[in-house]
Image (cartoon, grey):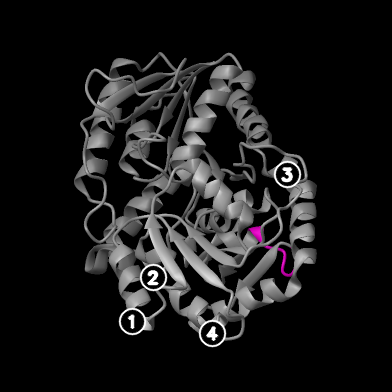
Amino acid sequence: MRICLIYDCLYPHTIGGAERWYRNLAERLRDEGHEVTYLTLRQWGRGEHPGVEGVEVVAVGPRMALYGPDGTRRILPPLVFGSGVLWHLLRHLRCFDVVHTASFPYFSLLACAALRRPGGYTLVADWPEVWSSTYWREYLGHLGWVGEAVQRLCARARQRAFCFSDLHAERLRALGLRSEPTVLRGLWAGALDRPDPQPAGSVAVFAGRLIPEKQAPALVGAVALAAASRPELRGVIYGDGPDRETVRAEIEAHGVAHLVSSPGFVDRDELEEALGQALCLVLPSRREGYGLIVVEAASMGVPSVVVAGPDNAAVELIEEGVNGFVAPSAGAEDLAAAILAVAEAGPALRQSTAAWFGAHSEELSLGHSLTQVLEVYRGPRARR
């Protein structure tokens, strides 16, 4: 099949769960023998190769800063990207059997929907998240209703939809999706064998972009409080972003520079080594469409602590007391209690986390999702 993937970012030029999904998907589809085109914004130097062998990567817009100083998406890049997608598809309308796009940042999905014709390409859209009215108002203020209206318009376009959690699949149905969404559980591209965990260290690890939704600064107070009961406890916050200074300010305010560090982004090998030796992963995010880092930790037998919340789908990956704990909030007392629960559970929790991963690894694998994706790709074309 001739498949067009559409996302305005490309891993590893930008790093995130969606970026890894589309990069892995492109390479797996290529390896299956499909002809793959990847439309994105330019994120590499002119004259340089984008770095995806066997996939035609097309920059349909210039290099642009996607995020503002506060970590929120800027408005102009999605408009530019949507226009670039529209223009490219206009010139190559009959070149694709399947057009598979991210729902966000919306304008590219609207462009694909506007150009689709009966008998033409199958339109597939990923919905990692469906934002609530409350979050739209928080994100855009008094203009939140505009974003919500655009999201609803996109949901009602004729498409085959993928979600990565039950939470967002249900929200998508409520927006008026015309077909039943397919929930993909598998984004993990690593080994599927049950891991043999390393002995637990004493470090609670956070890894991700330091944006307000991730609530990384909450780990500082939690470690400070937990260390009062277990003096050996430490915390490390890996990543960078607009909340980096807030993290540093929290470390200084609590006087815990000897307990908590914030080294920024580190290379993949260093992060994997630190995570494998960690006491636990702490993901205090209040908004997650999936939570791939939880699966990554479990693949090493490392339990996770996540936070309950109406927008946090990562809780769907936690079996309480088996591969981690769900804290009631990101408050220092709640997070500290969950970290201490991991410490008190000892090696048995690492073994049950490893067993949990071994039992679910096939469902959590990228290969499993690829099978589902190809079934959706082929379905409408087979009927025609």
Quadrant, the N terminus: top right
Tell me what residue is drawn at x 37 percent, y 48 percent.
153
Quadrant, the C terminus: top right
Instruction: Report helix, strand or loop for mark 3.
Output: helix
- Give the alpha-carbon distance from disc 4 to disc 1, as whole Å: 17 Å
Of helix, strand and loop, which mostly describes the magenta segment?
Answer: loop
Mark positioned earlier in the residue sequence (2 or 3)? 2
Label of residue 361 in the image: 3
Return the residue nearer the eye: 59 or 373.
Answer: 59
- Give the alpha-carbon distance from disc 4 to disc 3, as whole Å: 33 Å
Mark positioned earlier in the residue sequence (4 or 1)? 1
Instruction: Report helix, strand or loop for mark 4.
Output: helix
Q: Is residue 338 visible?
A: yes
Image height of 212 relative to 239, above or below: below
Q: Is residue 378 left or right of residue 61?
A: right
- Give the alpha-carbon distance from disc 2 to disc 3, as whole Å: 34 Å
Q: Are marks 4 and 3 in contact (CB under 8 Å)?
A: no
Res 139 → quadrant: bottom left
Tell me what residue is drawn at x 37 percent, y 75 percent.
251
**Disc 2: which residue:** 134
**Disc 4: which residue:** 333
Magenta extent: 317-322
Return the residue nearer the eye: 152 or 233.
Answer: 233
Instruction: Report helix, strand or loop for mark 1.
Output: helix
Mark positioned earlier in the residue sequence (1 or 2)? 2
Tell me what residue is drawn at x 64 percent, y 60 percent.
316
Residue type at mark 3: give it.
Ser
Q: Are marks 4 and 1 in contact (CB under 8 Å)?
A: no
Label of residue 253 in the image: 1
Q: Count the numbered circles shown.
A: 4
* Residue 69 image position (x, y, % from top left): 22, 58
- Give the alpha-carbon distance from disc 1 to disc 2, as whole Å: 31 Å
